[in-house]
Image: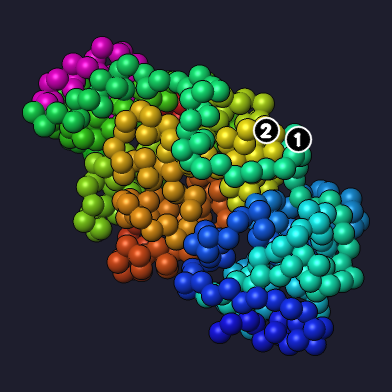
Amino acid sequence: MALAARLERFLARKGIPYTDVPIPQATSFNAAVMESGQPRADVVQATLLIDIKGAVMAVHQFDSALDLEAIHQFTGRRLQTLTARQSMRLFSDCDPGFIPPIGGAYDLPVLLDDDVAQAERAVMASGSDDSLLEMEGRDLRLALAGARQGHLVIRGQGNGDRKALSLDEVADKLQRLYRLPPMPALALRILRLTTNSEATARELAELIEFDPSLTAQIMRYARSALFNYPGEINTVQDAVTRVLGFDRVAHVAIGIAAVRAFDVPRQGMLGLANFWRHSLYCAFLCQSLADQCGADKGLAYLCGLLHNFGLLLVGHLFPAEFEELNTLREANPEISMYSLEQQVFGQARGDQVLAVGHGAIGGILHKLWQLPEPVVKAAGMHQHPGYHGEHENYVRMVQLANGLLKARDVGDEFNPDDLPALLAALDLDPAVVADLEEEIDRVAPDLDALANSLSS
């Protein structure tokens, strides 16, 4: 279909011109925007809110997050976001997730953010998963006539015009403007050892044993109930040869040693304790998925373990903004992490180097650290639904693992993923989810204990 039926009738009745922009069928509005090639600054979205008085549509820019406290002050109402199921009852003629930001077509009152009211051009959902709608700004304002205009979204510490940077430009600016932490020497030596096809368990053990703290953590990991090894484990070499294997020990050791490059708070939703919990759960699931996807298990584990390092880097470089992001994340679990980062980091600094999100920043860091390309891509693209490109299956495994973990409040972002689409893209039977859930239940206490020990 092109436009949702009610939207098409509304625009025809009002005589409002528009352009229908065909796109490849997308699994979500986010994916549609990513794949359309349209400037993100021109994209407008609708968020549905509700209280005892009824539903309201808030219309705001795509890369923005609603400030529910500001909306309360503006309206005097304590509005909360609708669930996806509630939304689709109101928009039954639309594909799920593709809600047009034209409330009048659905008899909904509209709150309009100031930024949208000043837009010269707008791109939006049409109600269909295979097209977008384009309008001139004046025509959008006609379509939204009667809307209440005000300050609806979270603002960063500054408000200036933003110009998107390419990843190459971001990488260049990061290196020129900030002192990026080098990969710690021990992590680098272990990484180099993994590229040597003739390296032995003894050589790996000797490297690890140079660091008493790392030795203790690897031993604790090997002795955990995750592996239920019945015999004694007295040395790191025992851990490598009898329990964990060369790759797993090397990858865990790289992760533990690399984290030491960053100075990040332990507490908070984005703090080190939750970082380790998220990373270990994701690594475990990615390794489990690799078996069924024909991927390299060790590489999949490393992708899951290191995919969120961008958060550590922004926390290390910008502690004040990181604290603000941490606070916003805890107060707005329904808002995408990317949108919050746009508000806090994108607007806080004139050079905009962090506006690309922590995923891309992590990918840049991993590339500078010369980590394997699948690890670079998994970090850099895990915030991008519908990614197609190099090493896409490793990206999808991380995205699927994160989607499964959100139901357990593990991770830094809890808005829903399109799990059926990810399963289909990985050519996995949906029944695999139940098996993975059972696996997580079995190992959760041990992963929690290990995460706690690694962050202390």
Extent of the magenta region: 199-222
Disc number for residue 202: none
Q: Amino acid at mark 1?
A: Gly
Q: Is residue 185 left or right of residue 170?
A: left
- Taking the spot 37% from the left edge, 34% from the top edge, the residue there is 367
Image: 417 above or below 372: below
Image: 219 above or below 149: above
Q: Is residue 442 magenta?
A: no
Badge 2 element:
loop
Disc number for residue 350: 2
Q: Disc 2 or disc 1, which is closer to the eye?
A: 2
Along the polypeptide, which appears first: circle 2 or circle 1? 1
Quarter-of-image position of residue 362: top left
Instruction: Name the outermost residue toward the left.
Output: 198
Q: Residues within 10 Å of mark 2 (few under 14, many from 20)?
A: some
Q: Position of residue 56 (x, y in %)?
A: 80, 68
Disc number for residue 158: 1
Q: Position of residue 234 (x, y in %)?
A: 19, 20
What secondary structure predominates along the stretch shown in magenta?
Answer: helix
CB atoms of marks 2 and 1 within 8 Å: yes
Residue 334 visible in the shown view: no
Q: Is residue 202 magenta?
A: yes
- Taking the spot 65% from the left edge, 39% from the top edge, the residue there is 346
The quadrant of the picture occupied by the N terminus is bottom right
Q: Is residue 354 left or right of residue 161?
A: left
Q: Position of residue 358 (x, y in %)?
A: 52, 39
